[in-house]
Amino acid sequence: MAKLTVKDLNVRGKRLLVRVDYNVPMEEKDGQMVINDATRIKETIPTLDYLIQNGARLILVAHLGRPKGQRDPSLSLRPVANKLADMLCRPVAFVDDCIGEKVEKTVGLLQPGDVLLLENVRYYNEEEANDPAFAEKLARPAEHYVNDAFGAAHRAHASTEGVARVIAKRGGQCAAGLLMERELKFLGDELEKPARPFVVILGGAKVSDKIKVIDRLIDKADTILIGGAMAYTFKLANGYKTGKSLVESDRVEMARAAVAKAKARNVQFLLPVDNIVATPVDTGKLNKKGKPVFDLQNPRLNSQPDIPADAEGFDIGPETARRYAEIIRKAKTILWNGPMGMFEDKRFAEGTFSVAKAVVEATEKNGAKSIIGGGDSVKALHNAGLGERVTFMSTGGGASLEFLEGAVLPGVAALTDK
Ligand code: 3PG
Ligand code: MG
């Protein structure tokens, strides 16, 4: 890696500001906030253990949700401190602020190997504004900086970018944590010279969200398999009827250009040949966000190229799933980003689950390297009960996508070059 990692630092006795991504899903239960999925906390343990073993004094900084500068108590990181203490099997101190006297006093008491978690850095608007004076305050108690928050590395915020500049200017070092290093390896280096066939599976709702990734991966992949609602925009681009399916009619040119590029590069670019559709019926009710709620009636297989006028597509069909699985099972490198359908509803989960099963089979039986690009695909894999049976699952959502697009992540760029 071209950037320093924690292994390059001499951390003994040093005070390290460590940015982690503890933006974990939480839920209120009996008046208390509980963590629904601690994966992001768990994935930082190797870095923290390494630093603890090597006698560093750790000041962890993180965000939770989007409180927009307000001290929203439901977005406090205190429950995370408790969870982290359980996972590290050692005490984790917590201060209900991330800058100021209280923080500095507690940091002054830290012994080598001690861990302190600071309160949600987004309680200050200056964080997202990447305010230089705020970055100075955050950096004040630390000698070096470690960024292990891959999931937030696409943000140029004070705790992901500004502090690194402050610390570097002072002569301190800024290094990647072990999780950050792994993410960059699997989503970056491993895809530069992939073992072939290299099969990319892309799903999700919108062509507009994925077009940059599609465009970039056409240069690298042997096969691209398309699923999710974005497949309906491709269907429309090919001149077929899409019924009530979600489409971006202003993106058909984009879709056509992607298909043409794939053809020119000799990349196999596959679209679904059948779909599971349903008839959406307005219930007259509104959801929490004020959007109308539809009852999805009469789920059925549609094997025609056209989707009937009253129907909406929600999953790939069994023939598509069979064809995709066959290709996936022969792959040596697999990158999967985005579900094939609305897998949260079990009537529309089969397509995504078949893909998940094929990815696991390729990994276990064919020795394929399988890389899951974060967010919904990771959730789908867990729902299918196949969570730990792939080579790598990213902890990033937006960050993975931007990195796969080829963007330079500000949180990475700010680290010290080797
Ligand atoms: C995430 O969950 O995507 C990261 O923690 C970044 O959060 P954000 O999208 O609110 O910046
Ligand atoms: Mg996000």
Image (cartoon, grey):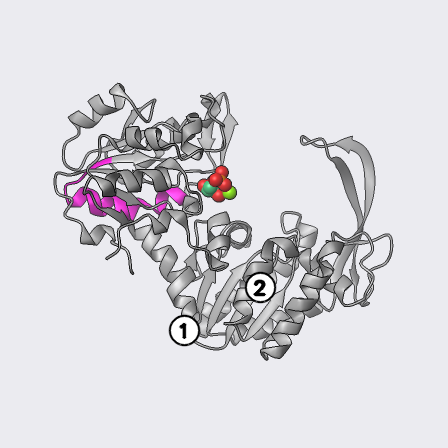
Which residue lies under the disc numbered 1? 193
Q: How many marks?
A: 2
Residue 190, visible in the rendered structure: yes
Tell me where the magenta segment starts and ends, as one range. Answer: 40-58
Give the quarter of the image for residue 254: bottom right
Q: Quadrant of the C terminus?
A: bottom left
Alpha-carbon distance for marks 1 and 2? 17 Å
* Image position of 38 (left or right of 102): right
Q: Identify the amino acid type marked 1.
A: Lys
Task: Using the image as rendered, state which of residue 395 and residue 124 is in the foreground.
Answer: 124
* Residue shown at the point (68%, 63%) measured from the top left: 255
How dense is the environment of label 2, judged by Cα within 10 Å: few (below 14), some, or many (20 and up)? many
If you read the primary sequence from the N terminus, does the residue marked by circle 1 or circle 2 appear first?
1
* Residue shown at the point (78%, 40%) measured from the top left: 294
Question: Could you say which disc has been placed on residue 349 in the image?
Answer: none
How dense is the environment of label 1, judged by Cα within 10 Å: few (below 14), some, or many (20 and up)? few
Task: Using the image as rendered, state which of residue 25 and residue 271 is in the foreground.
Answer: 271
* Image position of 383 (left or right of 59): right
Task: Using the image as rendered, state which of residue 361 and residue 324 is in the foreground.
Answer: 324
Give the structural element (helix, strand or loop) at label 1: loop
Which residue lies under the disc numbered 2? 214
* Residue shown at the point (75%, 64%) measured from the top left: 237
Can you give x and y, in whole percent of width and height, for residue 238 in the image?
Answer: 76, 68
Q: Is residue 402 magenta?
A: no
Q: Identify the amino acid type marked 2.
A: Ile
Looking at the magenta stretch, what is its main secondary structure?
A: helix
Q: Is residue 53 magenta?
A: yes
Give the quarter of the image for residue 211: bottom right
Can you give x and y, in whole percent of width and height, for residue 313 in the image?
Answer: 75, 55
Q: Quadrant of the N terminus?
A: bottom left
Give the quarter of the image for residue 393: bottom left
Can you give x and y, in whole percent of width and height, for residue 231 in the image?
Answer: 69, 61
